[in-house]
Amino acid sequence: DRTAYLPLDSASLPARLGTRAELLDRLGPPALWQVREVGDGNLNLVFIVEGPKGSVVVKQALPYARVVGESWPMSLDRAFFEHEALKRLGTRDPGRAPQLIFFDPAQAILAMEHLTPHKVARRAFMEGEELPLMGEHLGLYLARTLFRGSDWSMPTAARKADLALFAGNVELAGITEELVFSDPFKPAPLNRWTCGLEDAAAAVRDDRALKFAAQEMKARFCTCTETLLHGDLHTGSVMATADDTRVIDAEFALYGPMGFDVGVLVANLWMAVFAQPGHRAGGRAQRAYGDFLLATVETLWRVFAAEFSRLWRTERTGILGGRDLFEAQGDTLGAAAALAHHLEQVWQDALGFAGIEICRRILGLAHIAEFETIADVALRARLERRALAFGRHLAVNRRDIPSIDAANRLVRTREEQ
Ligand code: SR1
Ligand code: MG
């Protein structure tokens, strides 16, 4: 499709994409395609295209932010960065990204595998569905992608080229810099919150310790370019079944601190725990589902640390490898200490980023479906208030929370308040 950029719609899609051999192979004749627009994210169009031979997903960037409308123009380049990122992430942890079918840069269209019967993790959490392998899969994914995109692992020339390439994703980095780290902590036109939380929002704007933490985490995000991040790894970017987990939607990819992807992901799992009373009656079932979510966080972190340590021992081939300083001189304890020091930094960063992510999902522009779909506004406000207090605690006290167990216990304590 070499014509000027034009957004797709369900009616025009078969005619516009029906000459692509990759789609004909997978779908069969375009006259028989069924097209549904299913995008529920903040930025893009997403179509499921079904034909007699199979189905695919077609994603197209819009020249504006869908969540706000045409008054917020946005470059189409994010489709390019998503494609580049998914190629790399899919290689670093094979099988965890969707299979890519084609990319058309002029039309900002990315066609990929239709993940079915996968469900967006957020939706599964609202429906109370247990995904027993998700924590393990995501722990492995985080360790492999974060380690293998860094100077611990990559050849230095390739890593520097990628750093320069993804530095071009400046517009989406800017969205995170503003919407995540700044807006929720100051008066900002796009901020919004549930009715009844006015006092909590005002208290945050007056909370010097929290604003200081937000500014420190923003500085880490902007200046620590240690690895290629997914960049928006909330639970709407995860699709899962009982035995498979996939990570989608990498358009926010950029070089940043490892703790960012970890922290955003666990923040969204913790928020799902806080939201549970809005989705099922209290008592044993609710408690059990919260336990499942907390166990998922625990598994995720433990698997992440174990797999990262394994890669540290076996794949430390990049310019930061440091084998000459430690193992080559017989100092295996020194290598272990360096690893422990690094994991401690990731842990503290993850807690700090998790805290900020929770604050922004309650006070900023982009909220989460687990809270937004709670029709009882008073209940929603009560649950969001608890989550917000937890998020604040994480951000401000991130250096004093020693373990994943301690962090999970804090969730349970806040839930009871
Ligand atoms: C205008 S974009 C708002 C949010 O949606 C994306 O998924 C990111 O999380 C971003 O912060
Ligand atoms: Mg997204």
Image: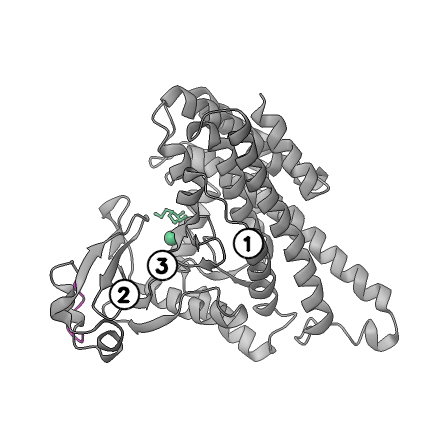
Looking at the rendered structure, the kind of residue marked 2 is Ser
- SS class, disc 1: loop
Nearer to us in this view, 374 or 192: 374
**Sooner in the amino-acid sequence: mark 3 or mark 1:** 3
Residue named by callout 3: 116
Q: Which region of the structure is painted magenta?
A: 1-7
Residue farthest along the right direction in this orientation: 330
The answer to which of marks 2 and 3 sits earlier in the sequence is 2
SS assignment at label 2: strand
Taking depth in this image into account, of 317 and 137 the one nearest to the observer is 137
Q: Position of residue 195 (x, y in %)?
A: 36, 22
Q: Do we see residue 367 in this rendering?
A: no
- Left/right of residue 75 with respect to residue 343 in the rendered view: left
Task: Judge the density around disc 2: few (<14), some (14-19), many (≥20) Cα neighbours within 10 Å.
Answer: many
Proximity of marks 2 and 3: CB atoms separated by less than 8 Å: yes
Image position, residue 193 (x, y; %): 38, 29
Residue position for label 1: 133
On whether residue 416 falls in the magenta region, the answer is no
Residue at 53% from the left image edge and 36% from the top image edge: 289
> What is the spatial separation of the Cα atoms under label 3 and label 1, in whole angstroms?
17 Å
Identify the mark at residue 10; answer none if there is no mark.
none
Magenta span main SS: loop
Q: Which residue is mark 2?
A: 55
| Amino acid under disc 1 | Leu
Q: What is the distance, in whole Å, between disc 2 and disc 3 at their CAs?
A: 9 Å
